[in-house]
Image (cartoon, helix red, strand yellow):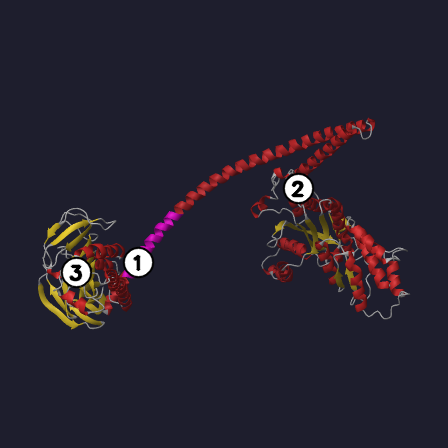
């Protein structure tokens, strides 16, 4: 690695960051001194006080402060208490192994020091105290002791421990109210380990204190550094470490770099100052420096080697993937051959099963027809309302259910065999929807579930005359609404119908069609090559084909999202049979097949958060036609499902008003939306007693000064008399009697009668 400013910058940042990690030792010593001062609080200092007051605090500091291996208190009268942790060294000298020990002097000016083991969990001394030699470094006469007493912020120094071991420690010492000094010691090996973990980007690192004590020795070959008072001396040494000469000498007061030539190799030497655990230090970084040509040669060699390596690896990977692909191809071919055999066998089994079922279906139908005939003969001879007649009726019902099941399964077989054909006929799609909704309304209303038809944007009324398979479309609607009634216990079932909007994709296909057919003849001579495109164009742009979208929305139990993908499979039921809603699980499977047969798709639409039930949406493509004048029906058909026969539309709808009194929130909301789309203002009332006051307010608000209470305008009477919902006595003489009838009808489930009487009151109030 040659010298670069980027590598130097990264190395300097890592060095200073590591030094900051080791700096909290001095603040910890100050906190410990304050804690001891607070604990002593003027108490006479003797060895007993040290054992009871000072020792627990020292043990707590040794146990909690990171990287600490020695905590020492030295009193002014030679009293000493020092705890040592052997985490970073061995205590082979005393035969104590890896443990915590204490070195203490319990008498003043005696010079007798003792060592004794300490319990690592409780801090209590145990065993026999052993006499050891004293160390003059830990006496009140030592220089560091006097420096700590004279400096309020403490004093940091590098030395050896008081236990007699020769391991270097970084000490931070702070005075305790002039009664002694407390010191925290950290093994120098901790600092070495931290700096050995730093990435110097292939540089050589040397660290020493400013007065020359080496902390980390440089590994630069045949070179050593000596530092004294920030003066760095670079010396050349032989293989035995003997100095053979001085290469250079420079002062390192701040960050600086120097170019040196050592043993014929040029180096860039960078030095800077920093503090290690509060001790002023100097570090030196050395990087080899190459000249420009040699630098380029090394770069080219490295790039060439990298290129050859990439080519070799790519070649190996290519061969590996070729072999692997060939093996996979062979395995896939074998599996395909095996799967084709299994598919043919399954097709044969399915065909045999279909043939057997067709024969069995004919036999079963013949037997059921015979049973049905016998039941009818027996029913003629049985007495009405007798037990035999009741049993025969139940048998007849069961026989019809069996025939229905056979028809359903037979439909599945026909669809699978592709034998189902569409029977095209002309019919009114709006009338079909209305008939289906009316058919299920009495069944649903018994469960207090409202069933209604929502015309949405009224687009269906304009294109309701279609050609298609009316029977199969009715079968689809009946199946979906039947399921909705079955699984809905409260709320409503809404059937929505609308004409689908033209998609952006279809418009692009239509617009580009002519351009696509003009140019290809330059390259292709046969018109047959574009038959597929013509068919696609006819399917997308047939003016007589319209796509209708129909939704069946309910407020029932709903279908969980994790089960929606299986709901259209045959013989699959989402709900548990324990709920009492049993079935064969064939209905939705047949519905999906019929919808696809009619050129559409069916799916389940996500409802908004908090809404119950499920919503099925399907679309079908049907041909539209214009009926003859005699077959034209009323364009306001969507109001029929609500049981309302409105007056013929007036020439001017603006300014017209309608007071709507009808049961059911969803029915009321749909009807209000439809009437407002006709630019008619709507006022709704929820109770019959609010009807008369509301009509009075509207009548008062309108400018009807030309109306007379004794006579009715002829045009208005003519509209009323010609309305299908009015007869000769459509205008009751007693208005309160009509409201009373509305209250009574509200308790029943008759939609037409309730709405008709509401409009009778409306006519009575407006006509005076």
Q: Give the CA separation, mark 3 to mark 1.
A: 63 Å
- What residue is shown with label 3? 74
Q: Give the CA separation, mark 3 to mark 2.
A: 95 Å
Tag shown at residue 229? none
Q: Secondary structure at mark 3?
A: strand
- What residue is shown with label 2? 587
Q: Position of residue 584 (x, y in %)?
A: 64, 37
Q: Position of residue 262 (x, y in %)?
A: 15, 66
Quadrant assignment, res 627: bottom right
Q: Nearer the viewer, residue 1 or 313?
A: 1
* Residue 586 appears left or right of 230: right
**Is residue 306 a member of the stretch shown in magenta?**
yes
- Quadrant into which the N terminus falls: bottom left
Q: Give the CA separation, mark 2 to mark 1.
A: 67 Å
Crowd band around label 2 with a 10 angstrom C-alpha radius: few (<14), some (14–19), many (20+): many
- Quadrant into which the C terminus falls: bottom right
- Front: mark 2 or 1: 2
- Which residue appears at 66% of the width and 53% of the height? 535
Res. 645 in view: no
| Magenta: main secondary structure | helix
- Front: mark 3 or 1: 3
Range of magenta residues: 302-321
Q: Earlier in the sequence, mark 3 or mark 2?
A: 3
- Which residue appears at 58% of the width and 43% of the height? 566
* Residue 465 appears left or right of 578: right
**Is residue 469 a member of the stretch shown in magenta?**
no
Q: Secondary structure at mark 2?
A: helix
- What residue is shown with label 1? 306
Q: Position of residue 611 (x, y in %)?
A: 62, 53
Q: Is residue 286 above or below residue 628?
A: below
Q: Nearer the viewer, residue 505 or 312?
A: 505
């Amino acid at each position: 690695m040659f010298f670069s400013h980027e590598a130097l910058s990264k190395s300097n940042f890592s060095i200073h960051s590591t030094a900051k990690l080791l700096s909290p030792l001095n603040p910890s010593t100050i906190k410990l001194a304050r804690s001891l001062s607070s604990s002593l609080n003027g108490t006479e200092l003797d060895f007993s006080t040290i054992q009871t007051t000072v020792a627990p605090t020292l043990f707590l500091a040794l146990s909690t402060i990171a990287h600490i291996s020695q905590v020492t208190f030295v009193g002014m009268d030679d009293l000493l208490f020092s705890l040592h942790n052997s985490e970073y060294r061995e205590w082979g000298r005393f035969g104590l192994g890896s443990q915590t020990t204490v070195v203490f002097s319990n008498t003043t000016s005696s010079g007798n020091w003792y060592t004794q083991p300490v319990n690592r969990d409780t801090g209590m001394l145990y065993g026999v105290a052993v006499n050891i030699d004293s160390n003059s470094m830990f006496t009140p006469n030592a220089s560091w002791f006097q420096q700590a007493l004279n400096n309020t912020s403490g004093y940091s120094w590098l030395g050896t421990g008081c236990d007699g071991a020769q391991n270097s420690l970084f000490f931070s010492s702070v005075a305790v109210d002039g009664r002694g000094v407390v010191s925290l010691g950290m093994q120098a090996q901790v600092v070495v380990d931290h700096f050995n973990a730093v990435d110097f980007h292939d540089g050589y690192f040397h660290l020493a204190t400013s007065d020359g004590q080496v902390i980390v020795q440089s590994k630069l070959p045949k070179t050593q550094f000596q530092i004294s008072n920030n003066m760095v001396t670079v010396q050349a040494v032989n293989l035995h470490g003997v100095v053979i000469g001085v290469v250079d000498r420079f002062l390192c007061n701040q960050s600086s770099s120097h170019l040196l030539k050592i043993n014929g190799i040029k180096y860039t030497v960078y030095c800077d100052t920093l503090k290690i655990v509060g001790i002023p230090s100097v570090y030196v970084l050395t990087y080899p420096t190459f000249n420009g040509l040699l630098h380029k040669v090394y770069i080219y060699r490295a790039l060439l080697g990298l290129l050859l390596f990439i080519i070799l690896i790519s070649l190996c990977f290519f061969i590996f993937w070729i072999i692997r692909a060939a093996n996979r191809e062979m395995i896939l071919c074998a599996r395909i051959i095996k799967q084709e055999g299994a598919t043919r066998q399954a097709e044969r089994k399915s065909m045999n099963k279909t043939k057997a079922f067709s024969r069995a279906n004919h036999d079963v139908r013949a037997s059921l027809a015979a049973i049905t005939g016998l039941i009818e003969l027996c029913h003629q001879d049985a007495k009405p309302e007798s037990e035999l007649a009741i049993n025969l009726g139940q048998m007849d019902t069961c026989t019809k259910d069996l025939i229905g099941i056979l028809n359903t399964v037979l439909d599945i077989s026909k669809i699978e065999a592709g034998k189902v054909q569409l029977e095209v006929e002309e019919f009114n799609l709006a009338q079909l929807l209305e008939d289906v909704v009316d058919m299920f309304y009495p069944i649903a209303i018994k469960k207090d579930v409202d069933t209604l038809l929502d015309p949405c944007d009224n687009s269906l009324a304009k294109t309701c005359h279609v050609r298609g398979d009316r029977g199969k479309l009715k079968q689809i609607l009946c199946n979906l609404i039947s399921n909705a009634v079955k699984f809905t216990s409260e709320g409503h079932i809404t059937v929505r119908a609308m004409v689908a909007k033209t998609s952006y994709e279809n418009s692009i296909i239509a617009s580009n069609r002519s351009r696509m057919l003009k140019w290809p003849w330059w390259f292709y001579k046969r018109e047959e090559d574009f038959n597929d495109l013509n068919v696609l164009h006819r399917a997308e742009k047939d003016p007589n084909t319209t796509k209708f979208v129909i939704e069946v929305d309910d407020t029932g139990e709903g279908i969980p999202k994790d089960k929606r993908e299986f709901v259209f499979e045959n013989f699959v039921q989402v709900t548990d049979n324990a709920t009492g809603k049993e079935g064969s699980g064939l209905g939705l499977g047949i519905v999906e097949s019929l919808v696809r047969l009619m050129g559409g798709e069916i799916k389940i639409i996500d409802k908004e958060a908090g809404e119950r039930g499920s919503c099925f949406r399907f679309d079908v493509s049907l041909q539209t036609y214009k009926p003859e004048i005699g077959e034209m029906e009323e364009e306001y058909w969507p109001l029929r499902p609500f049981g309302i026969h409105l007056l013929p539309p007036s020439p001017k709808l603006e300014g017209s008003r309608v007071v709507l009194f009808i049961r059911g929130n969803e029915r009321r909301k749909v009807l209000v939306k439809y009437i407002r789309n006709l630019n008619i203002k709507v006022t709704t009332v929820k109770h019959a007693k609010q009807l008369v006051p509301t009509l009075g307010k509207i009548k008062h608000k309108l400018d009807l000064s030309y109306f007379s209470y004794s006579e009715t305008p002829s045009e208005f009477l003519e509209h009323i008399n010609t309305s299908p919902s009015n007869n000769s006595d459509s205008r009751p003489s007693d208005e309160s009697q009509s409201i009373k009838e509305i209250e009574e009808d509200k308790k029943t489930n008759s939609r037409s009668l309730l709405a008709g009487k509401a409009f009778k009151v409306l006519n009575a109030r407006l006509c005076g």
